[in-house]
Amino acid sequence: MEQKLNLADSSSRGPHNALLATNGRGHGRGGYRDQTHVTKYARGDNKDKVVVVGEMKLEKMLSMKGGKGEGSYVNNSEAQAKHARSMVPLLKETLDLVKLGPPDLPFVVADLGCSCGSNTIHVVGVIVKHIAGRYESSGQDPPEFSAFFSDLPSNDFNTLFQLLPPLASSGGGGSLEDCLSSTTHRSYFAAGVPGSFYRRLFPKMSVDFFYSAFSLHWLSQVPESVAEGGGAAYNKGRIFIHGGKEAAANAYGKQFKSDLAGFLKARSVEMKKGGSMFLVCLGRTSVDPTDQGGAGLLFGTHYQDAWDDLVHEGLITSEKRDRFNIPVYAPSLQDFKEVVEADGAFKINQLQLFRGGSPLVVSNPDDAAEVGRAFANSCRSVSGVLVDAHIGEKLGEELFVRVARRATSHAKEILELLQFFHVVASLSLAATCT
């Protein structure tokens, strides 16, 4: 298939409200990715004397906010669900490119950055049903299916597995066709795979199809030059690169490209001959990396101001604020394309910037307080674990109260301006790698 590089408007494909998390889908996608460098947090900056995290690999503790509370990812991923559904036609185009193996061998699909919501379950069901239909159309019986749900070890896999429907059985009188068409049972074997997708997760040539949505914009780490004082890239006074120094944004961009290269290298080893993958991450329309678009409005305005409130009120020091940085980078299409082409293991089938909508889902847009709460919960569901680790749960609660208050005062502006774009990539293993 020819490479396509264009801008797709969601209005041509139905509702398109996309929230950045992450994966990730219910798709919230798994928090800091592969935070392998050790970060030291100073004690004593906050008045409630919370002992914050010391020398610990953040990969082991960070994730989307688990559980089923108001600020949890499960209850703040409806926008991702709508977004994922609007991209099903693009997903199916990629599925049609996968080379079908013999039906006596399992077809293996992996969702990377699955998070803990129901969206990942829905998408895997779509994938399995579509591939089964391709086998049937070719006059073959569908194979058995295996689905791997992967995210960082800190992901709330318990909540995810509780949402999984029971496994359908083709024995005892039920046909395989009945199993595949069931809406109350799943027609695939399921397993969880903890680990960073920036490294190897599966055996060589073991996976037919990879899916990852709302995850790859999460960096494996905040570049040291951004987090540590003294250099040109030091992000002083800010918690995100939006509207900040060009040097800080460039450091984020370099980290993103390094992370994506590691992701592609790992998948090229794990993918079966004839395999493909469908990737979605936050994107931007501007060539200027300091303009992070929707992510910038989410993290660089009222959220930033709420951190400043804590400083001005004497609840934390400015230095403590400055040591907190949101590890998200929204790439341009060119950023993404350069990494894929430099890697050389994958052919680009399609590469699009998909126009999204607001990450906020509100029942009454005229209710400013509801908009404010939705804004705060969106921030909290994807960054709350990071916040609690940095300043403690008590001050984290204070922070998001202030986020909601500020967002309530700007509700109309938020609904008008807060819009997301996503990079959507369809990739197949290049012939030279098969």
Image (spheres, rainbow, N blue to C red):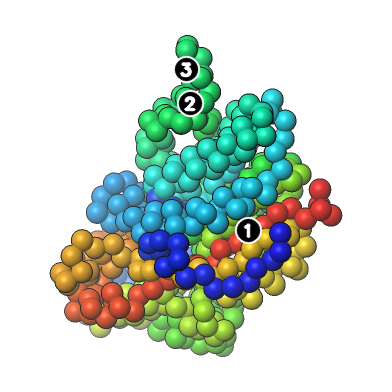
| Marked residue nearer the N-terminal end (2 or 1) | 2
Pointer 1 local density, CA inside 10 Å: few below 14, some 14–19, many at least 20: many
**Which is more foreground, mark 3 or mark 1?**
3
Q: Is mark 3 on a helix, strand or loop?
A: loop
Mark 3 highlights which residue? 174
Foreground residue among 417 and 248? 417
| Marked residue nearer the N-terminal end (3 or 2) | 3
Q: Residue at x 44, y 86 (%)?
A: 243
Tell whether label 2 touches label 3 (CB within 8 Å): yes
Q: CA–CA distance between discs 3 and 2? A: 7 Å
Residue 97 in view of the camera: yes
Residue 320 in view of the camera: no
Image x and y of residue 342, in percent: 75, 68
Q: Which amino acid does label 3 sit on?
A: Gly
Q: What residue type is labelled 1?
A: Ser
Image x and y of residue 346, in percent: 73, 58
| Vertical comparison of 243 with 96: above or below | below
Q: Residue 321 carries which label?
A: none
Image quarter where the N terminus lies is bottom right
Mark 2 highlights which residue? 179
| Vertical comparison of 126 with 362: above or below | above
Pointer 3 local density, CA inside 10 Å: few below 14, some 14–19, many at least 20: few
| Vertical comparison of 315 with 345: above or below | below
Q: In this view, does 271 lie to the left or right of 434?
A: left
Q: What residue type is labelled 2?
A: Cys
Mark 1 highlights which residue? 426
Foreground residue among 410 and 58? 410
Q: CA–CA distance between discs 2 and 1? A: 29 Å
Q: Is residue 336 left or right of residue 346?
A: left
